[in-house]
Image: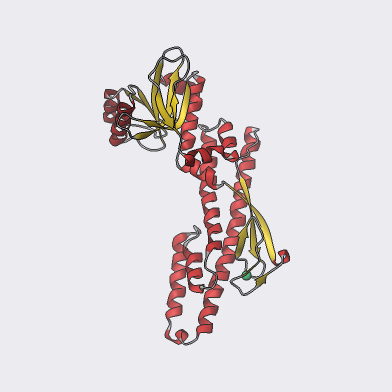
């Protein structure tokens, strides 16, 4: 925690700090590159990264299957069919069918047949996963390079994972490093020649968190405010009079005017409760003026009225508006 008391401002100092979780995310090089594109409010870019986000989550869910317990085949099977994001409901149906087959009275006596059935199902799924990962990688790389060509820019926002597959059964054995082990198919993996190594490009976990927590929107709003020569502190926790810390998306300082205001960024509809919570936070930290920026296209007159009564302005549709219009809407 630090006391924030910028030079040249005659305002009561505030006690602020940033959570470690956020600091780590913001220090990631791909996240930094992402912010530096200055394209955060570009509609096409938004579509691009939303799409890559979805695909990257699927990629990472596929990586998770390396954590399965090796010798428990049935658990392995369950994991394969339910923990990956590959068309979840379809997979679950497949899993139930196999489970039903396993319960078949004639099979119970035959442990070997049971094992064989499970193994076959896992191998099938491994093949599916490998195919899917290759597809996802191709789609992600194509969409990025297409965007780069269209916009004449260079994007360095992807991370690469080297995925090691068993050559015999296609199971993912490890990520980013070779590991000796016994594969589920029975193969003893001792040499690199027994594996197939495929690079997969995707958003890393920091990028995923950055996007899913809507931190990107706070950086986008910072970018707009900077165009108005207003500096902001992004994603700080501010100590209130109550002794409670409040997360404030952007704290904006108006130069030469000894004035600061507070911003809340929402990638969803603005609800009545959002106004009350934001207003409550402001009162506790001694703020009098606020803005809510939202990607939502509209907000009801009632909500607007409520916000106005708390000295909060709502700026809607930030993803689809011209930058100049957005700048004009900020009255400070
Ligand atoms: Zn294998």
Q: Quadrant of the C terminus?
A: top left
Q: Position of residue 282 (x, y in %)?
A: 33, 27
Q: Position of residue 182 (x, y in %)?
A: 62, 71
Total of numbered circles in the picture?
0
Which residue corresponds to the image point at 30% horizontal and 26% vertical from the top-left? 283
Which residue corresponds to the image point at 44% horizontal and 65% vertical from the top-left? 92
Q: Foreground: 51 or 234?
A: 234
Q: Quadrant of the N terminus?
A: top left
Q: Residue furthest top?
A: 256
Q: In the figure, residue 172 lies in which quadrant?
A: bottom right
Residue 319 visible to the viewer: no
Q: Foreground: 89 or 228?
A: 228
Residue 198 visible to the viewer: yes
Q: In the figure, residue 192 lies in which quadrant?
A: bottom right
Which residue corresponds to the image point at 55% horizontal and 36% vertical from the top-left? 45
Splitting the image into four quadrants, where does ligand 1 fall?
bottom right
Q: Is residue 61 left or right of residue 160?
A: left
Q: Foreground: 318 or 2?
A: 2
Q: In the figure, residue 152 lies in which quadrant?
A: top right
Which residue corresponds to the image point at 60% horizontal and 39% vertical from the top-left? 29
Q: Position of residue 175 (x, y in %)?
A: 61, 57
Instruction: In the rendered view, tell whether residue 30 sits above or below residue 111.
Output: above
Q: Is residue 329 left or right of residue 308?
A: right
Q: Position of residue 159 (x, y in %)?
A: 61, 46
């Amino acid at each position: 925690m630090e006391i924030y008391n910028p030079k040249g401002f005659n305002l009561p100092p505030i006690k602020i700090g940033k959570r470690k979780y956020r600091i780590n995310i913001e220090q990631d090089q791909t996240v930094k590159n992402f912010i530096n594109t200055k394209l955060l409010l570009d509609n096409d870019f938004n579509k691009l990264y939303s799409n890559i986000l979805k695909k990257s989550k699927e990629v990472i869910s596929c990586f998770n299957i390396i954590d399965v317990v090796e010798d428990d085949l049935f658990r392995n099977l369950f994991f394969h069919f339910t923990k990956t994001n590959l068309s979840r409901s379809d997979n679950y149906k497949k899993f139930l069918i196999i489970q039903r087959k396993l319960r078949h009275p004639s099979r119970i006596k035959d442990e070997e047949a049971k094992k064989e059935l499970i193994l076959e199902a896992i191998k099938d799924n491994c093949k599916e996963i490998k195919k899917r990962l290759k597809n996802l990688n191709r789609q992600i790389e194509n969409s990025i390079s297409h965007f780069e060509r269209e916009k004449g820019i260079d994007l360095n926002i992807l991370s690469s994972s080297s995925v090691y597959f068993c050559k015999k059964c296609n199971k993912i054995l490890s990520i980013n490093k070779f590991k000796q082990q016994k594969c589920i198919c029975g193969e003893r993996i001792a040499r690199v020649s027994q594996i197939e190594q495929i690079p997969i490009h995707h958003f890393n976990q920091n990028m995923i968190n950055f996007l899913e927590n809507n931190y990107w929107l706070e950086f986008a709003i910072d970018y707009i405010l900077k165009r108005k020569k207003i500096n902001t502190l992004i994603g700080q926790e501010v100590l209130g009079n109550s002794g409670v810390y409040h997360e404030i998306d952007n704290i904006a300082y108006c130069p030469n005017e000894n004035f600061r205001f507070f911003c809340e960024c929402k990638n969803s509809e603005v609800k009545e409760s959002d106004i009350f919570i934001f207003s409550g936070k402001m009162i506790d930290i001694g703020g009098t003026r606020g803005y809510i920026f939202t990607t939502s296209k509209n907000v009801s007159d009632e909500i607007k009225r409520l916000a106005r009564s708390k000295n909060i302005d709502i700026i809607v549709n930030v993803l689809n508006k011209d930058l100049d219009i957005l700048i004009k809407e900020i009255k400070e």
